[in-house]
Image (tube, helix red, strand yellow):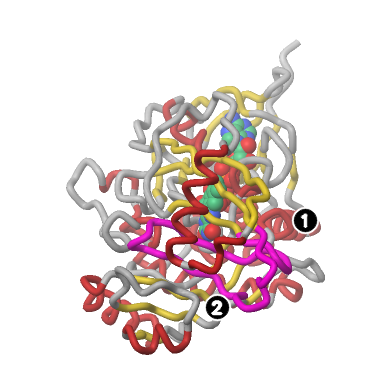
Amino acid sequence: MPVAPRGHEVGIIGAGIHGASAAFHLAARWGIKAAIFEQFAAAGGPTGRSSAICRAYYTNRYLARIAHTSLDMFRAFGELTVGRDCGYRQTGIVYLHDGADAAALREAARYMNSIGTRIEVLGPEDIAGAFPLFAPEGIGVAGWEPDAGYADPVTTTAGLLARAGELGAEQRLYTRVTGLDERPGGGARLHLVGGETAECERLLIAAGPWTKALAAMLGADLPLTVERHYVATIRWSHAREMRYAHADIPGGYYCKPEGDDLYCLGPLTPEPEVDPDEPVRALDDEESHQLASLATTRIPRWKDAVSTGGWASLYDVSPDWMPVIGEIAPGVFVDAGTSGHGFKLAPALGAEVAALLIGDEVDAGIREFTPDRFGSGRQLAAGYGQAKILG
Ligand SMILES: Cc1cc2nc3c(=O)[nH]c(=O)nc-3n(C[C@H](O)[C@H](O)[C@H](O)COP(=O)(O)OP(=O)(O)OC[C@H]3O[C@@H](n4cnc5c(N)ncnc54)[C@H](O)[C@@H]3O)c2cc1C
């Protein structure tokens, strides 16, 4: 005899940081107990491999506001989640730019300062005085964000999810969604591994690199692609001299401190497309060497730093490198395409996505991230030159 599907008011596919945050806000603000379907563990996809740099340095004004609120949430995480730790460490980040970015940077900095994000714009002499380790070639201007830092992506995700669970959300970990059908009246019927089905009146697909394939099951064609990105780690015995992070836009890489004497390095530029269903190729020596060589060109004293390994994972990328958020079928929404900069947005963005999902009030700015912008010439500007990842 067929078993009647379990019914849920709201379902979420994906327990990465975006799904976890939406579940947290649905429970904490609206008392809605979502069911979260995740094929692995919480943060078992790209979220768990994230460098998790948390900054509010954005050219897009909506994301600048969201990132600013997210940073407040990282700082107040224990209180918000009743005792959990997101591992937030404030280090400050300096963004090194070509002089050609000066006007755009000054305009972005004016806006960020007006909403409470402290950004100092530095000229070549200030940079040399405050950051003497950097070789000056190619740097005309810099932005310094003293309140930025990084978090632990796994404990952040687990903390939001655990609090959502305490408030009644249902975590279905190791439960892969294998099929989706439209549900009369809105939402979707989910086919789960093992043959079970579940009905959701509203569904959020926050499945990162696998979002495109899930959306296609409901007839939506999202222009998302997937790139393999990597992080190389180095150890430097004088790491105490440099505890801040930096993004070298002309050099094409970013760097954040990790622990007491390590740094994580990653590219700021696009990488080749891959199939998310294939195993992710590990970081190789050539990639590690290339990042280390970019970094030692900028910081000559790092010549005695030692490579200590690294890893690779996936970015789900949209054509303008900005998130893709909105309704794709009646009662079915996506939040994906975060293109390598979505970790720090998620704590605050999850509240907006949750509101959109249940039809509550949102900041109108979220609507510019609609999935249909690509077909109608409304792509968004992002970042600086090739470094669209800066948003
Ligand atoms: C190497 C690297 C470095 C990064 N550095 C930064 C950074 O410094 N700062 C920053 O802000 N961002 C950074 N990012 C980007 C950031 O990590 C991502 O934007 C963010 O983690 C995306 O979260 P998500 O929840 O949307 O997706 P994901 O983490 O991809 O989560 C989606 C989840 O959905 C699950 N899923 C998919 N399909 C199914 C299915 N059919 N059934 C059930 N479950 C399913 C997956 O298993 C996965 O756990 C980085 C990313 C990487 C890879």
**Residue 104 versus residue 355 in the image, above or below:** below
Label disc, if present, on residue 89 of the rendered structure: none
Q: Is residue 382 left or right of residue 280?
A: left
The residue at 57%/75% (across/down) is 244
Please state which of residues 279 and 328 is positioned toward the viewer in this rendering. 279
Q: Which residue is mark 2?
A: 92
The residue at 38%/50% (across/down) is 269
Q: Which residue is mark 1?
A: 162
Q: Is residue 194 left or right of residue 284?
A: right
Q: Dot 1 surroundings within 10 Å: few (below 14), some, or many (20 or more)?
A: many
**Residue 83 versus residue 112 in the image, above or below:** above
Please state which of residues 310 and 388 is positioned toward the viewer in this rendering. 310
Residue 375 in the image, given as x and y percentages of width and height:
22, 41
User: Is disc 1 in contact with disc 2, using a CB cutoff of under 8 Å?
Assistant: no
Q: Which comes before the other along the chain, label 1 or label 2?
A: 2
Q: Dot 2 surroundings within 10 Å: few (below 14), some, or many (20 or more)?
A: some
Magenta residue span: 235-263
Q: Which element is circle 1 on?
A: helix
Please state which of residues 154 and 216 is positioned toward the viewer in this rendering. 154
C-alpha gap between disc 1 and disc 2:
29 Å
Residue 106: tell me if it is visible. yes
Q: Is residue 99 left or right of residue 145?
A: left
Looking at numbered disc 2 in the image, what kind of residue is underneath it? Answer: Gly
Point out the residue furthest to the top here.
1
The residue at 66%/71% (across/down) is 239
